[in-house]
Amino acid sequence: MRFQVPTHLEYFKSLVQGDDGFPLLEAAVCLAQDAHPEMDVQDVLAQMDVLLERIKRRMPEDASAMHRLRSLNHYFYEELKFAGNRNDFYNPNNSYLHEVLRKRLGIPISLAVLWLELAQGLGLKAHGVNFPGHFLVKVYLSQGQVVLDPLTGQSLSPSQLMEQLEPHLQRMGLQGELEMPLGLYLRDAAPRAIIARMLNNLREIHSMQGQEFALTEVQRRLDILG
């Protein structure tokens, strides 16, 4: 009996067909297959398993959520040296997780997906945030929620968040008489919405750079995602 290997799009469709148990990391990794067909998704997942196992081994079983968060940020940003690719921000490779893992450089949403995988693996109640203009992450602690910039791991105060939100409010004409509660923009992002944002980022980059074939491939994935 012969087994037919699924195409990249068939594989993607199988991952995103339902919302229960949506495999965020795996779905995000496979977005690179159109541009990098030789990329091994399972190898990338295995690399992340190794990174998680390393930090779990050094973590006391009774470590508080705050201790886990601080240890993760030190590990991710200081030891592994993940950072934003500020010198080449619009390179599509910044959205391809195998390249982000290799270079330790990415954009907020790609860094966030990797960070979230480790955070959740450590038992933290961590989620992505589809904040306008800059993807964020947040963690629920007993003291309340902490919102962080995935480029640096630094926590953001309400005033800093409102400052980042201001340009969006101006574009939407939502200033002046209308007071928009900050919490409306800090809701948990569903994994499907995170993948959609990653694909929309790629669509914008390919459109800006006139990469028609790549643009078509991204649109196919968006159509599958729904």
Image: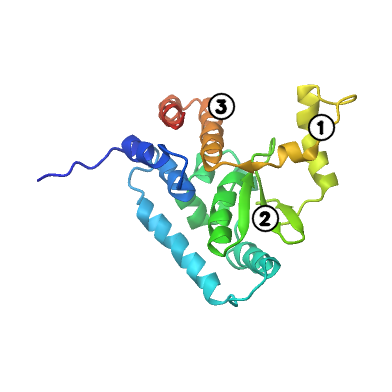
Disc 1/disc 3 C-alpha distance (Å): 32 Å
The amino acid at mark 2 is Val
- Name of the residue lying farthest toward the top: 173
Q: Give the Cα distance between marks 1 and 2.
A: 22 Å
From the image, tell me which residue sits under label 1.
180
**Which amino acid type is marked by label 1?**
Met
Q: Residue at x 81, y 36 (%)?
A: 181
Give the amino acid type for the residue marked by disc 3 in the picture: Met
Q: Residue at x 42, y 25 (%)?
A: 216
Identify the mark nearer the N-term, 2 or 3: 2
Which residue is the site of mark 2?
Answer: 139
Left or right of 59 on screen, residue 31: left
**Residue 66 in view, yes or no:** yes
Residue 223 occupies which quadrant of the picture?
A: top left
**Few, some or many residues within 10 Å of mark 3 (<14, 14–19, 20+):** few
- Counting every numbered tag in the picture gives 3
Query: Residue 215's spot in the image, x, y percent?
Result: 46, 27
Disc 1 and disc 2 in contact, CB within 8 angstroms = no
Residue 207 in percent (x, y) is at 52, 25
**Mark 3 or mark 1, which is nearer the start of the sequence?**
1
Q: Mark 3 points at which residue?
A: 208
